[in-house]
Structure formats: structure tokens, C-alpha cells
Image (cartoon, grey):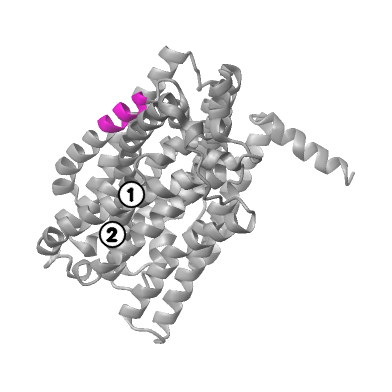
Amino acid sequence: MPKLLTTDQYGLTSILVAISNLFAQFSSLGFNSVINRLFPYFRSEKEKHHGFFLLLILVGTVGFLISLVGFFSTQSFLVDRYSEQSALLVDYIYYLPLIILATLFFGLWDNYNKALFDAVSGILFKEFFTRILIFLAVVAFGVGVVNFSGFVFLYVMALCSPAILMIATLLKRNQVSLGAEWGFIGRRFLKIIVSVAIYGLLAGMGNMAVITIDKIMVNDMLGLSSTGVYSIAFYFGTLIILPSRALKKIATTVIAEAWKRKDMVTIQKVYRETGFNQSLLAFLLFVGIWANVGNIFTFLPPEYSAGKYVILFIGLVNVLDMMAGVSSVIVLNSPKFRMQTLFLLILISCIVFSNLLFIPIWGMTGAAVASLVSVVVFHTIKYLYLLKVFGLKQFDRRYLGALGIAIVSYTANLLLPQFDNFIFDIIVRSALIGTIFVGFVLLSKLVPDLNAFLKSQLAKFF
């Protein structure tokens, strides 16, 4: 995309997603938290989950209608605000309601689907099929089959495709029921649902603000072109966190069931092991990306070089997120779930304040620094809270070993000369880092299950 689109055209694709995600999160009215936290109490295939799917549809519809009122109320303000430095956004702002609708219901249906113990389909639809469709749209634009307006239309259709695929999957499995069973809920249970939804809405808006607020503020303070550069660099940094998405979706259901049984042993084990395993992956990916940062900007257009240190700081942000494991999931599904809202309000306040402080000084790099500072504060507070209130411990000596292996791997990369062919350089440099990192992990037996698995596989051949 950076090869074929100008920085402001790419910025448009990024800001459309950012704004629609924020509106869609509000439109859910916190019902994603209800699904994650309370669906175990509705679960009954025989009883069609006591009308839960219909409740989901009704809440989503009401939320979307409220969001439409909010969108059309702020549309004139957005048009006036961005008519000069973000003119493309004004030209294509009419696509936002459709993207909001598709994003909203995909989120609800995906959470419902994962509550039925399928964490894979949603990731496949959103992270794979959507990107295939976007790639085809880019190719169509690149070879001249469609103009930029046609590309934007195809891009929007690609963003809407996961919702269509998800509802088709649920229908095929006969997991859609529009039957009502209001008597099952009762006044007392309804009060609990509303309480969880309210705090879930606040927490969800907080989470989404964390993901989108930097792009929105970069667009507001620096313009759509800078947003395009920032977004490309941001995506390289977020490669680090991709492996955690499926894990967190699975862990959400496991932890919700564990809290229902008050099984603190399971929660402690999931907390510690997911945190460490994610840290290993994060260290490896961060070292691999930063070691190849020169190669990254070799094939990007020159104007994207301003985003080099955005990759560094956003990469570190995602390393910290991976190290935190499922801490947010634990808090959100615990009896103290309201605390997650407080933590996120602190995080949002830090992000807004630090962006206002650092963007005027360092531009888009300042936005990345602001995210790093804010995330350090957020995860530190959350870690201390889980330790003090629930006695949950995450860190042990293994983390020092993993960090040492990462440092050794990166140092070995520095001893390697830079090859003229950047593709060859990426292959050799990445192979060196990967071999050293994985080799030391196996030799140190930091992950005994991995050693046992490899030993059992080798036994089949020798």
C-alpha cells in the first residue's frame, strides 16, 4: 500500500478504521463484557442458550442507532475541523456508518462465537480474509482497474466482510436463535447484566481509546499525511502482539469459567505461564524487527523514514503488553472487574496528556513515546493490584533468562555485516537471531513443555 498510495491516502484508510472502531465500541453498550463474563450462566445448547443471541442483537441495534445520532450530530464538526489538512476524510466520511455497523456486529458475534469455544474463526476472518481482500483491492488500484474512489469502496467492503462471514458461520452451525426467554433473566440477574455492561462499556471505550487515540491526535495535530506515515510504522510495531490475540480469546473463556468456580490455582497458572510464553515470543519478534529496521525502510518510500523510531517505541509498548499476559482479562472477569475501568481511565488520561506534551516536541515519534510512558504506568499499577488483592504473582527468574537470551541474539546481529541485497540480509539476519534465540531457550530449558515435545517428536525418527 505505501508503494501505491500517497501518505494522505494511506492515512485515510487508517483514520476510517480508527474512528469506526471507537464508535463501534460505544455501540456495543458494553455487551462484549456481558458475553465474556456472564455467558457461562446462559450456556445451554438444549435451551438455545436461553435467548442470549436475541438479547445480543437487540442491544447491538439500540447501540448502533444511538451511535448514528452521535455520528450525524458531530459530522458537521468533523467536516469543518478537517476540511483543510485532512480533506480526503471529509470526501469519504459517508462510509463511516457502514463500517461502524459491520465492526459492531462482528465484535459481538465473534465474542459470542468464542464463548462457544471457537477462537479461531474470528481471527481467520478478520486477520486473514480481510487482508486478502484488501490486497486484491490494492492490486486492482495499482494496475488501474479502479480509481482511488473505487479502491476506497473495495476497502470498505473488505472491512465489512468479517461480519458477513461470521454470521454465515453461526447460521451454518445452527448457533443462531431468535427465540426469547425473558423469564430466565429475572430482575436480579438483569441488574447484574446492566452493571457488567456499564463497566464493560467504560472499559471497552478505554481499551479502544488506547488503540485509536494516538492516530486521531496525530491526524488532528499533524494532518492526514503524518497519520499515514505513523500508521505504517505503528503496524510494524504491532506485529509483536499478533500471537497473543488467539491466546487471549481462549484465555478469556477459561478464566471466566475459573472465576465462576473460584479456582484461583487455574487463574494463577494461566496468568504466569501465558505471561512468560508471550514474553519469549515478544522478545524474539522485537529483536527480529528492530535488527531489520534498516531493511524495512529500504523498500518503503523515502517519506516513511520519519517513522523509524515509532517502530522502536510502539514495539516496546507491545513487548510490555505481551509481558502483562492476561492480567487485564483476569481483572475484567474478577469480582473486582470495576477496577479495570479505573485503570483504563488512568491510562487514557496519561495518553492524552503525554500526547499533548510530546507531539509538539517530537512529532509522530512523540505519540509513540507517549504510548510507551502511559503503558508503563498502566501495567505497573495493574500488576501491583493483582499482587496485593488476589496474591497473584507473575514474574520469576525465567524472565531474566529470556531477556539475557534476547540481548545475546541482538548483539550477535550487530556483528553481522550489512549485505547489499536487503532481502538476503533479512533472511540471513533473521535466521541468525532465530537460531541463537531458540537454541538458547532449548539449552536453558526455560520452557520444559517445548523440550519434552521436541524430544517426543525426535523419538519417532531415531
- Compare residues 139 and 111 and report the one nearer the observer: 111
Dot 1 alpha-carbon crowd within 10 angstroms: few under 14, some 14 to 19, many 20 or more: few
Judged left or right of residue 114, residue 14 is left
Name the residue type under label 2: Ile
Which residue sits at x=26%, y=30%? 346
Place of residue 217 in the rendered image (x, y in percent of width and height, measured from the top left): 20, 50
Give, as a single range, the part of the protein colored magenta. Answer: 338-346
Which quadrant does the C terminus fall into?
top right
Asked if disc 2 and disc 1 are in contact, CB closer than 8 Å, the reply is: no
Place of residue 29 in the rendered image (x, y in percent of width and height, measured from the top left): 34, 42
Residue 401 can be seen in this image: no
> Dot 1 corresponds to which residue?
62
Judged left or right of residue 350, residue 207 is right
Judged left or right of residue 159, residue 441 is right
Q: Is residue 88 above or below residue 387?
A: below
Which residue sits at x=49%, y=60%? 162
Q: Is residue 28 above or below residue 74?
A: above
> Dot 2 corresponds to which residue?
15
Q: Please say whether residue 342 is one of the residues in the magenta stretch.
A: yes
> How far apart in space, not on screen, are marks 2 and 1 (Cα)?
25 Å
N-term-proximal mark, 2 vs 1: 2
* Dot 1: element: helix
Which quadrant does the N terminus fall into?
bottom left
Place of residue 125 in the rendered image (x, y in percent of width and height, measured from the top left): 53, 59
